[in-house]
Image (spheres, grey):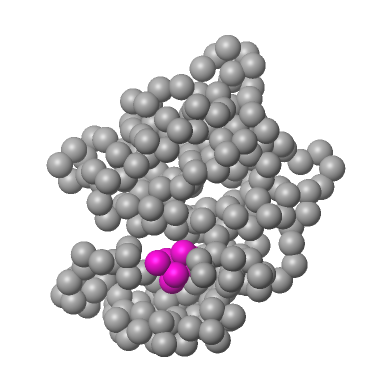
């Protein structure tokens, strides 16, 4: 069974659409697969009523050429359905050492059309702003994760050698999963071996911090509002 239905089944409660909330009709979403669980949760809750939701593979920041290809392909598919597209990628998700002047916004601009990106640095920043992460850390050195990083870690880190892992993770006190969907507790209960394997590979413990999806909802809604104003006014 795919992992995201398991996450949704155990999610504590649902977000409900409040009167006056932004509608995503007339928009499609293109999102990094790492955030698939959260985006599907918002869709299931009724908040995200986009025309179509498309995902790239998780963890493509580790392979810039693949990210560029998959993003372009999914944008083209999204534009077959909707004039307006919202991209759920962070500003730091595309870093190409061979072309440091190019970033994810460059990829989007090169594609053309009425496409806007949520204003965040990465998927972690989409779930908790820097100030909230500082509060959670309480002075500890933390390596931040999301449910998708835990679920797909073997795919995301498939090209890492032990030396790179040893240089990256043990400098932190622990890893913390920003959990906005009630994922980590049931996942750990049902898949303890996988969690322990990931923790052993990083050489630090893994814990979870419960957060809401309000920040992600706000980031999405902000770009829908801006893109609607731009296209309706003929400015973009």
Residue range corresponding to the magenta coloring: 146-152
* Residue 144 visible to the viewer: no
Q: Quadrant of residue 68?
A: top left
Q: Is residue 8 magenta?
A: no
Q: Identify the residue at horizontal 68%, vertical 42% (top origin).
A: 49
Q: Find residue 98 and report its horizontal and vertical position in percent.
A: 15, 42
* Residue 40 visible to the viewer: yes
Q: Identify the residue at horizontal 31%, vertical 79% (top origin).
A: 202
Q: Find residue 24 and report its horizontal and vertical position in percent.
A: 66, 36
Q: Find residue 198 and report its horizontal and vertical position in percent.
A: 36, 80
Residue farthest right in this picture: 19
Residue farthest top in this picture: 234
Q: In the picture provided, is 234 more to the left or to the right than 155? A: right
Q: Find residue 22 and report its horizontal and vertical position in percent.
A: 72, 38
The image shows a total of numbered marks equal to: 0
Q: In the picture provided, is 169 more to the left or to the right than 191? A: left
Magenta highlight: main SS: helix
Q: Identify the residue at horizontal 55%, vertical 43% (top origin).
A: 53
Q: Identify the residue at horizontal 63%, vertical 58% (top origin).
A: 41
Residue farthest front in this picture: 1
Considering only vertical position in the picture, is 26 above or below 148?
above
Q: Quadrant of residue 180?
A: bottom right
């Amino acid at each position: 069974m795919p992992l995201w239905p398991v996450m949704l089944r155990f999610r504590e409660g649902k977000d409900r659409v409040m009167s006056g909330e932004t509608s995503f009709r007339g928009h499609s979403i293109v999102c990094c697969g790492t955030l698939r669980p959260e985006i599907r949760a918002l869709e299931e809750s009724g908040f995200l009523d986009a025309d179509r939701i498309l995902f790239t593979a998780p963890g493509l920041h580790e392979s810039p050429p693949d990210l560029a290809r998959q993003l372009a392909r999914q944008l083209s598919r999204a534009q077959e359905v909707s004039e307006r597209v919202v991209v759920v990628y962070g500003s730091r998700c595309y870093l190409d050492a061979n072309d440091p002047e190019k970033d994810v916004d460059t990829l989007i601009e090169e594609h053309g059309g009425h496409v806007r990106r949520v204003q965040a640095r990465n998927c972690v920043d989409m779930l908790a702003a820097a100030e909230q992460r500082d509060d959670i850390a309480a002075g500890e050195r933390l390596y931040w994760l999301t449910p998708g990083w835990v679920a797909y870690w073997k795919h995301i880190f498939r090209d890492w050698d032990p030396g790179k892992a040893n240089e990256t993770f043990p400098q932190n006190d622990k890893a913390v999963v920003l959990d906005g969907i009630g994922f980590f507790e049931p996942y750990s209960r049902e898949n303890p071996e996988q969690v322990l394997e990931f923790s052993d590979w990083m050489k630090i413990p893994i814990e979870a911090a419960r957060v809401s999806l309000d920040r992600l909802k706000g980031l999405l809604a902000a770009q829908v509002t801006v893109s609607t104003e731009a296209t309706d006014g003929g400015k973009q």
